[in-house]
Amino acid sequence: MERRFSKTIERAQTSAVRDILKLTQSSKVVSFAGGLPAEDSFPTEAIRDAYERVFARGKGAMQYGVTEGVPALREWLTGFLADKGIGTSVDRLLLTTGSQQAIDLAFRVLIDPGDVLLVERPTYLAALQSLSLADGRAVEVDSDDEGMLPDDLEAKLRTHRPKAVYVIPTFSNPVGKTWSSERRRALAELARKYGALVIEDDPYGDIRFDAANRIQTLYEHDAALGAASGDDGNALYLGSFSKTVAPALRTGFAAGPADVLRMMAKAKQASDLHSSAADQLALLELVTGWDLAGHIGFIRDMYRERMEGFVAALKGGPLDRLRWNRPAGGMFLWASLPETYVAADLLKLAVEEGVAFVPGEPFYAGVPARNTLRLNFTHTPPALVPEALARLSRAIERYSVEVYS
Amino acid sequence: MERRFSKTIERAQTSAVRDILKLTQSSKVVSFAGGLPAEDSFPTEAIRDAYERVFARGKGAMQYGVTEGVPALREWLTGFLADKGIGTSVDRLLLTTGSQQAIDLAFRVLIDPGDVLLVERPTYLAALQSLSLADGRAVEVDSDDEGMLPDDLEAKLRTHRPKAVYVIPTFSNPVGKTWSSERRRALAELARKYGALVIEDDPYGDIRFDAANRIQTLYEHDAALGAASGDDGNALYLGSFSKTVAPALRTGFAAGPADVLRMMAKAKQASDLHSSAADQLALLELVTGWDLAGHIGFIRDMYRERMEGFVAALKGGPLDRLRWNRPAGGMFLWASLPETYVAADLLKLAVEEGVAFVPGEPFYAGVPARNTLRLNFTHTPPALVPEALARLSRAIERYSVEVYS
């Protein structure tokens, strides 16, 4: 039967990461491809007890809820965010199905067909997919290790007059980079100057390896700029409990200006009425009767150790052809091969050797750096890492022989 | 701060139902407005035990899952649907956040800006909202108690060449009506003739008051037409466990042609990666270790009794100015006031008297019948119904005195 689909979905790509995950289901392949937290980090018993307390509260808990999400969880969240320096209120918070839905809703309320969104180079793949579904167009801003370059940012704000700039300034996906304070302030200022909303995607911020080194969010930088005039802010902050509690509960959120949140709630009403109230209530029971801060500390220690073990093994022989930066937090390490290498071709050899990663290519909205790749260091059990990296080493060696001989 | 939103969200209305729900939070108002199941119907203990079994399965259950939803639940669902005459397979099923998300995803993959969707007159409010968000345009097909009128349907299929026709043929929201078998077949045939996909929204189908009277779905009618050619079908079937288990688990689904489901999964990946795996796993434990069919029977009996009590009290004095049909299932009763009455004006007096309903107006995509209203009979405890309807009676009496004096 002939079928007519919308132009945007015809054009849409499925996630390269998810497609690779399907290829590597074989238990013989060690995968650094997914963006998965370690299962060891999931507080399963505490979650189980939390659900039990939800059901002890009676049948009302199982009824339809409000679109914005369980009010008491939003109330708790205002305090959780205040501790990070993020001032908000119950009516400027929206609970979502993971922070992916917060991204999608933000784009749905901002983007008209053809509208430009400024993004980092490279940026989060699934944000590009959401943008594409809204029929928007991503324009990359040149970036270095500190964040977007202010000159290029201003030039593109002036040229495109975008409604928004989307960034992951803290332990970014895919690059694992942390923006400097100066670059954060520059973006906050320029975005206000040109009337573009800042969308700060921060699913990894809690996982900083140096616990003492608190990083000011873009949201705070923006709030400081608006403090004098008392305005409602120009930054939308997106967060998630998928990495600090567990992905299966699919609870993320957006905090920001009241008018943006109101529009997002309207879009969410038409999208799914509301996210799982069972999960939100369980998360509420979890965080109020349990030491979340302590648990985040436990994850930090676990992931720092995994990162250190990973980078210690990521050297010697052909692996020295990779260049990478040691991340200060998060879940990813971004590596570059020599310029003429194509990571997607290397992947085929790597899977033959029994190891997988994600080529950098799909993370670029513009011309891709095809010699890049993303490595996840949080999910693979540490004992398997040295052998898996030895396989990657063999794949690189084979690549240079087979391609350059 | 001046903000620029997308055209579609600027235009979007919030749900009249949800706005009314906010107005009637006062405990003195008895509300027939919401589309809420009875809390007494929630199998809370069975749900609690189901979650407990999920956590007993270890930490892996809390990890990210596939976009299409927990495979074992989809596997079970193929059997559940087969018992209703709906043939499908694991890869032609998508689990969603309630059936609302299934509606939204269907529209996202079909509708380009300006595209026409054919709908019933009147139809489900939140489907109109989703369509509006996709920048589509609803065109109403004239309908009577048996379903869409085939002549008008064919005329509008010919004129607009829509990609899809959206209907709720069984115990519809808002009308509580059941399409005849002839009208179902006519729609299935005409949709194939003009290349429009049938979207059959069926959240209420299980709640039929006459258990023995199995109703053939549109999906089955369509499958019968395609059986000879062995095609993959031209109907998308949307369902939900919000009414038969509990809304808080937010688990709905779409079943249909493989190409449509593939596109919807692509859209879902960008929307929220996947719905709550915790809820899906709990639902799986629930339905495999428990008598769902028996529970559905229990809900049928409870709701039939409530409907009968409701219609028995819905008569006498000013209430006799209402015209309505006795529903054969579902949760709603649709009533008409005399033609000159405006239900939205009556609502103000009704709330003063202490009772609420939803005016019919927002359920119309075209010119509304402003004298209509929707009454939910499943949520209000039966003991409160006679007094609440007496209040409605007083409001109608006041309306005729105040408006016509």
Image (cartoon, coloured by chain):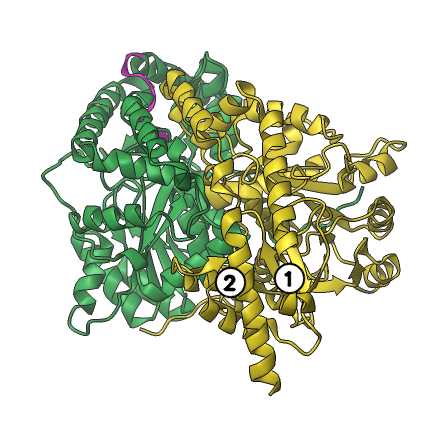
Chain colours: A yellow, B green
Q: Residue shown at 55%/55% (left/top)?
A: A386
Q: Secondary structure at mark 1?
A: loop
Query: Which portion, as a residue range, is magenta?
Result: B374-383
Question: Which label's residue is closer to the chain start, 2 or 1?
Answer: 1
Q: Position of residue A288 (x, y in %)?
A: 55, 19
Left or right: residue A387 versus residue A303 is: left
Q: Residue shown at 72%/33% (left/top)?
A: A211
A205 and B44: which one is in front?
A205
Q: Position of residue B282 (x, y in %)?
A: 33, 35
Q: Is residue B254 within the magenta segment?
A: no
Find disc 1 in the rendering and name its residue: A136
What's the residue type where badge 1 is placed?
Gly
Task: Indicate the quadrant containing the N terminus of chain A: top left, top right, bottom left or bottom right.
Answer: bottom left
Give above or below for B349 relative to B125: above
Left or right: residue B330 versus residue A172 is: left
Task: Indicate the quadrant containing the C terminus of chain A: top left, top right, bottom left or bottom right.
Answer: bottom right
* Chain that bears disc 1: A
Q: Position of residue B36 (x, y in %)?
A: 37, 29
Q: Residue furthest front?
A: A316
Query: How far apart are labels 2 and 1 at the CA level?
Result: 31 Å
Quarter holding residue A92: top right
Quarter holding residue A219: top right
The disc label shown at residue A356, or none:
2
10 Å crowding of disc 1: few (<14), some (14-19), many (20+) = many
What's the residue type where badge 2 is placed?
Ala
Left or right: residue A326 versus residue B243 is: right
A278 and A404: which one is in front?
A404
